[in-house]
């Protein structure tokens, strides 16, 4: 009997234990995992199966509010908002987690924050950038796969999925809005240009932050899109005007200000509930602005998707 008992114990080890549920109780203890996603507060490293040779990694910040919610049949009765935070080129998910301030947002506001890992520290954002572009990596497929996993698990609210990116990651945020229409209710783009061959978006709210002294992605346009692409970056005004027109919105005529964050101007809401805002940061270079996470989250939470 001892060998059989040992086999049974091994089969029920903590790493392989099935998800537990409270069997439909109104407010019970959450399972340790839901569809393989940990429910304990903190940052966890996970993988997303994109159908390629190897799964892609992402970090997931789980706020304490997830465990505190009512649970029914092994799922939260009300899913949480999801924010996907995309790092810049020559950086990684850990750096984005450190500089963005989104862990604070997660724990304070009750938001799931996913920090995906780029391919060789880069994203295929259209005409940019580096290894991911040259290899034709399907980063849109990767990010939408991780969103789908969290939504299908009942952890993330499909009407409150947002993306925010810095530099190369900001370029990918534009591409996600263009090529995964309806997935993201709003995007936030910091220090990036919109440079891609096509865009077929659904109504999407867009907030853009950019320093006027950005030497890497110039505010007024210029420089070069990539090391092997000498074309200049389009100016910030190109993206602002594009998203205004797609959403049927007027020029930037309203003040949008959040305590502790940069000052911005916005179009106000259109008929579909969408809005476009620009935070022109005088004198800032190619950097993540102080308090950007506060301004971005305030904008996001006011713009859920409307069917």
Image: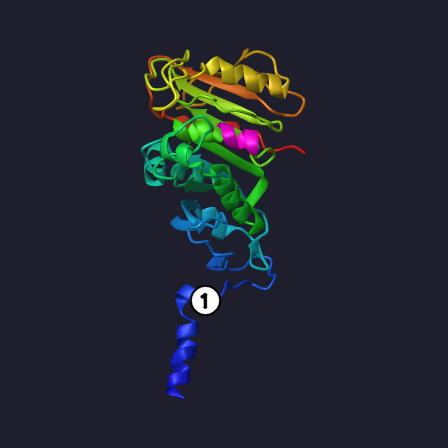
Residue drawn at (39%, 13%), measured in percent from left and top?
Answer: 222
The picture places residue 45, in percent across and down from the top left corner, at 38, 49
* Disc 1 packing (10 Å; few <14; some 14–19; many ≥20): few
In this rendering, is residue 102 above or below 283?
below
Q: Nearer the viewer, residue 206 or 47?
A: 47
Residue 177 lies in the magenta-colored region? yes
In this rendering, is residue 187 above or below 103?
above
Q: Quadrant of the N terminus?
A: bottom left
The picture places residue 57, in percent across and down from the top left corner, at 40, 47
Residue 16 visible in the current orientation: yes
The picture places residue 214, in percent across and down from the top left corner, at 34, 17
| Quadrant in the rendering for residue 270 | top right
The picture places residue 109, in percent across and down from the top left corner, at 47, 38
**Residue most extreme to the bottom:** 1
Residue under numbered circle 1: 17
Residue drawn at (57%, 43%), measured in percent from left and top?
Answer: 157
> Which color scheme is applied?
rainbow
Q: Nearer the viewer, residue 164 or 40?
A: 164
Q: Quadrant of the C terminus?
A: top right
Residue 266 visible in the current orientation: no
Left or right of 301 on screen, residue 123:
left
Residue 223 lies in the magenta-colored region? no
Left or right of 167 on screen, residue 66:
right
Q: Nearer the viewer, residue 133 or 21?
A: 133
Local SS, label 1: loop
- Circle count: 1
In this rendering, is residue 141 above or below 234?
below
Residue drawn at (53%, 49%), measured in percent from left and top?
Answer: 149
Which residues are drawn in magenta? 174-179
* Main secondary-structure element of the magenta-colored stretch: helix
């Amino acid at each position: 009997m001892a060998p059989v008992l040992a086999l049974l114990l091994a089969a029920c080890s903590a790493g392989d234990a099935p998800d537990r549920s409270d069997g439909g109780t109104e407010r019970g203890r959450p399972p340790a995992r839901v569809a393989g996603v940990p429910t304990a507060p903190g940052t966890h490293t996970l993988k997303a199966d994109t159908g390629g040779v190897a799964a892609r990694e992402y970090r997931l910040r789980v706020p304490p509010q997830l465990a505190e919610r009512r649970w029914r049949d092994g799922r939260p009765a009300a899913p949480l908002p999801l924010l996907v935070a995309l790092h810049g080129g020559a950086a990684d998910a850990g750096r984005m987690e450190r500089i963005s301030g989104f862990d604070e947002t997660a724990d304070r506001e009750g938001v799931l924050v996913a920090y995906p890992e780029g391919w060789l520290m880069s994203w295929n954002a259209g005409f940019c950038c580096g290894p991911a572009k040259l290899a034709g990596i399907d980063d849109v497929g990767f990010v939408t796969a991780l969103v789908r996993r969290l939504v299908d698990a009942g952890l993330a609210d499909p009407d409150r999925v947002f993306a925010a990116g810095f530099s190369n990651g900001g370029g990918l945020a534009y591409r996600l809005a263009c090529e995964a229409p309806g997935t993201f209710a709003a995007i936030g783009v910091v220090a990036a240009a919109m440079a891609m061959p096509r865009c077929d978006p659904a109504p999407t709210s867009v907030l853009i932050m950019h320093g006027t002294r950005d030497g890497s992605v110039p505010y007024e346009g210029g420089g070069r899109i990539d090391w092997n692409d000498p074309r200049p970056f389009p100016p910030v005004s190109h993206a602002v005007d594009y998203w205004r027109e797609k959403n049927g919105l007027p020029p930037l005529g309203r003040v949008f200000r959040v305590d502790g964050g940069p000052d911005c101007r916005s179009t106000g809401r259109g008929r579909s509930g969408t809005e476009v805002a620009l935070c022109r940061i005088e004198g800032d270079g190619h950097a993540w602005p102080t308090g950007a996470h506060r301004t971005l989250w305030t904008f996001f939470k006011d713009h859920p998707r409307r069917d």
